[in-house]
Amino acid sequence: MSASPHSASTQSAPLSGAAILVQCLVEQGVEFVFGYPGGAVLPIYDELFGDAKGPGHIRHILVRHEAGAIHAAEGYARATGKPGVALVTSGPGATNAITGIADAWMDSIPLVVITGQVPTALIGTDAFQEADTIGITRHCTKHNYLVKDPADLAATIKEAFLIATTGRPGPVVIDIPKDVQIAVPSQRRALARAGAHRYAPQTVAPPEQIVEAVELIANAQAPIFYTGGGVINSGPEASRLLRQLQDITGAPVTSTLMGLGAFPSQHPDWLGMLGMHGTYEANMAMNKADVMVCIGARFDDRVTGRLDAFSPGSKKIHIDIDRSSINKTVPVDMGIVGDCGTVLAQLIEAWGNRQAQDLGEWKARIAGWRARECLAYPERSAKHPGMIMPQKAVERLYALTHQRSPIITTEVGQHQMWAAQYFGFEDPNKWLTSGGLGTMGYGLPAAIGAQLGHPDALVIDIAGEASIQMNIQELGTASQYRLPVKVFILNNEYMGMVRQWQELTYESRYSNSYSDSLPDFVRLAEAYGWKGIRIHDESELDEGIAAMLAHDGPVMVDCLVAQDANCLPMIPSGAAHTEMMLYGDTVEGTMDDEAKALV
Amino acid sequence: MKITEAASERHVLAVMVDNEPGILAKITGLFTARGYNIDSLTVADISEDHAVSRITIVTNGPPQVIDQIEAQLERLVPVHKVTDLTTAGPHVERELALIKVTGTGEKRVEALRLADIFRARPVDTTTESFIFEITGPPDKVDSFIALMRELGLVEVGRTGIVGMIRGAEGA
Ligand SMILES: Cc1ncc(C[n+]2csc(CCOP(=O)(O)OP(=O)(O)O)c2C)c(N)n1
Ligand SMILES: [Mg+2]
């Protein structure tokens, strides 16, 4: 094996499986592979070593834990719209990657994950570092492959990228036994099972549905657009078209957690996020709307609240590229299967130069709900009046950074919801968060991936002190690749979201939700070669943020915030959109078993 | 705390799939992961080049769940087509069973007489046992087995059903 993968693209010299893999990745335009080596992928690592010398080579980003590799690939994918690629070894390498793969599956993030496997002859013998990766990932991938013949590799990789990136995107795993990486196939086979009957996502909606949908929207007195991550996944053009459709129809817009940024937060018809921690106006408008157009969202239980009380009076149109999302939990009047961007363009064209209805009355009702100022949090914490309110910290972070159009990642918990509520997004691909799986530890590696994809962008992980510890080892990755990511910890010394639920449901019995024995985050940061900053009170807040921005390397900010702040508004699980708890309501209490059983 | 269940209907689905490793695990795993029911499942390679298999699944659930099952199956990459034979119109359902019955004297004669009525064939015979082969719609097979139960039934093997739409159209 001598030829470099690039000079061999003419297919002259025979290549090993590992060399074919690297060549195919180059052909797919892969810039970064996030990975971690081990016995079962050594042949691939050796190829990458050779590749590093070639032109247009792939950069391998060595993470510190395979979970970090997958989340970094997700962050890269979400921030750039390109597929993320990860490479891990067999056994523990693959099992460490599972959470991230499941995360990408839930949030429809295009990933191609390459896992090493024990040699084919040893499969099934409980060999050293053998795990049934295909079995384990079967239900958290869009598709997966075990490649047993190197002749199938090239075609498999090609199909894997196609499947990961088209239709409803998602993770695809390619499991490659070590002997297949080493063997030199005499030929390259096309996949026996290819063709349109196998995989052909429907992207264009039937014209008659479009006509009917336009009719419904045009005649609505109280329309609403409820948009989701599908608009982001469809590409920036879909966000532009959403704005255009909104402009000609005048309908107010709300979005799921995953869809933030598709519609500009500074627009007067933006209602804010909906659902469990959504705004009062968004949830009330959903409840009272007469026509609801769901675009690339999936009626998640965090969004709908109690199903039988969800938007009871509306005609519902659901646009989604995945037919199984339609009528899954909420029956709709019209399910349109198609790509969000394509269908939005179809709707705009069919709308033509119609005049929008006068929605004055509807907008006036919305203004009434807005006047409730549901995000106006108490100025001071009751228990710690001297501490920074976490909402305030996010507001200031937003105020001091939004001109730079930063990319924000988050961990999972209250801080994530506060970030969604108080940070505004004007563009897609700027907001990276783990929505469906809710994976603590997502934010730091995702920020690393996003920073690699956008080297000049300001990338900030808004974190909680508990979550950040779940993938804290990735501080080392950022140091190694000189990535100037910022981690902004809202340190409330609690798993705040857990504490809040314990207050709500278990009469404030805080079982194991206190973040005891925290590290000194400033010194921890410094130990990894980061800059560490601590913000104790409000007088230091702006200054601390400015210092974070002024430093051109990675910075970790430990922002001490009030421990007792709760994240409101909130629709308790199993309640209707009209039954929101707002600031000023009593949070402490208990619930019956029916309510306790809800997540 | 009460656990609720909705009323079910029975549906027969014909699923055409790429004949690749793991496809059966994908499909059965989808049913268990999402809490759907499988009453019976048959699978065999049906194409000349062994590239395509036909899986017949008998399932039950409320109409909305049946619709989800079909959509979720269609979402799997190796699945080409899902046909709901129950909603597609009149269709034929057949199942094959092997039924072992032991007995002597009057019971043995009666078993053979009933087998004749049901057009079940003895495919193995000893002086004190028969194996009958019966083919038919599942309820016919059910009735035959119920009768044999009283006449010395020892063992039953059933294939689960295969089905096909009546008329000239293919699924
Ligand atoms: C991997 C994982 N384990 C457990 C949970 C459950 N969980 C959700 S939020 C949360 C607390 C997070 O605490 P912190 O990071 O400090 O955020 P805060 O809510 O305090 O802002 C926990 C434990 C989870 N989402 N992910
Ligand atoms: Mg916390």
Image: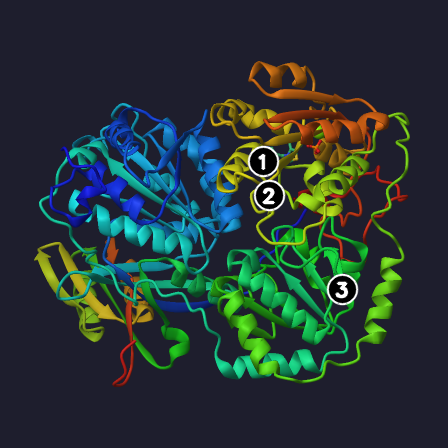
Tag 1: amino acid: Gly
Q: Quadrant of the N terminus of chain A?
A: top left
Identify the residue at horizontal 73%, vertical 32% (top origin).
A496
Give me the chain letter of mark 2: A
x and y, in percent, of residue A486 in the image: 62, 31
Identify the residue at horizontal 84%, vertical 51% (top origin).
A374
Give me the chain letter of mark 3: A
The kind of secondary structure element at disc 3 is: loop
Disc 2 from disc 3: Cα separation: 24 Å
- Eye-nearest disc, 2 or 3: 3
Tag 2: amino acid: Thr
Q: Which residue is mark 1?
A: A443
Whether residue B152 is visible, yes or no, is no
A566 versus A314 height, above or below: above
State the mark number for residue A433.
Answer: 2
State the mark number for residue B165.
Answer: none
x and y, in percent, of residue A127 in the image: 25, 25
Give me the chain letter of mark 1: A
Instruction: Check chain identity for marks 2 and 3: say if they share one.
Output: yes
Q: Which residue is mark 3?
A: A269
Quadrant containing ligand 1 reads top right
